[in-house]
Amino acid sequence: MFIGEFCIKIIAVGPQKYVENRMNLLDGGVVMLSLLELFMGSGGGGALSAFRSVRVFRTFRVLRVARILRSLKQMQQIISILSKSASSFAYIAILLMIFIFIFALIGMQTFGNKLLFDGEKPRGNYDNFNIAFLTAF
């Protein structure tokens, strides 16, 4: 799909204008490296592991969507509201962890080494703090 987009875009705008845009250069580079990996990747040698690490650069294509989102005024407003509310979310998460900590300790006091069903302990028990914390969570 990306190879088709690459070819159509070069035909539509021409090579000169294609090279002028940095995002086009990034996209073209990722497509060229993918093609190189595709043609040389069938051998499976150790030198080709470097080409496999290039797959990480494919994630840079996601930046194109972020660039589009910056241009929309409503989306800018939503992003600013989300960034402002992130600090409040951190306080709520800390408060939640404190409550889980307290209920894990209460569960250890109340149910510690007392939960046996048919002679076996259930996965969610309160015998030690780690399992009690996960059970309360």
Image (cartoon, grey):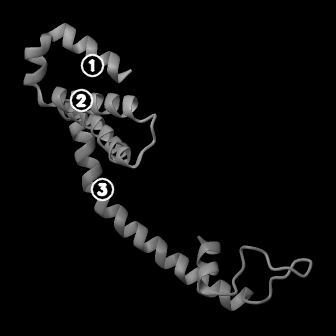
Q: Earlier in the sequence, mark 2 or mark 1?
A: 1
Q: How many marks?
A: 3
Q: Position of residue 114 (x, y in %)?
A: 80, 88
Looking at the image, residue 110 sits to the left or right of residue 30; the answer is right
Asked if the residues shown at circle 2 and circle 1 are in contact, with their CB atoms under 8 angstroms apart, the answer is: yes
Q: Position of residue 65 (x, y in %)?
A: 28, 32
When the figure is inspected, residue 99 is found, relative to residue 88, above or below; the finding is below
Q: Which three-letter amino acid code belongs to the residue tagged 3?
A: Ser
- Given residues 48 and 96, the one toward you in this image is 48
Residue for point 92% across, 77% down: 118
Residue marked by disc 1: 6
> How far is disc 3 from disc 1 in space, using C-alphas?
39 Å
Q: Callout 2: helix, strand or loop?
A: helix
Residue marked by disc 3: 85
- Return the mark for residue 101: none
- Return the mark for residue 27: 2
Q: Quadrant of residue 21?
A: top left
- Given residues 118 and 5, the one toward you in this image is 5
Q: Label 1 crowding class (10 Å Cα cut-off): few <14, some 14-19, many 20+?
A: some
> Quarter of the image containing the C terminus?
bottom right
> How far is disc 3 from disc 2 in space, using C-alphas?
34 Å
When the figure is inspected, residue 14 is found, relative to residue 120, above or below; the finding is above
Asked if the residues shown at circle 3 and circle 2 are in contact, with their CB atoms under 8 angstroms apart, the answer is: no
Q: Quadrant of residue 121?
A: bottom right
Q: Which three-letter amino acid code belongs to the residue tagged 2?
A: Asp
Q: Earlier in the sequence, mark 3 or mark 2?
A: 2
Q: Label 2 crowding class (10 Å Cα cut-off): few <14, some 14-19, many 20+?
A: some
Q: Residue furthest top?
A: 12
Q: Position of residue 134 (x, y in %)?
A: 60, 73
When the figure is inspected, residue 27 is found, relative to residue 14, above or below; the finding is below
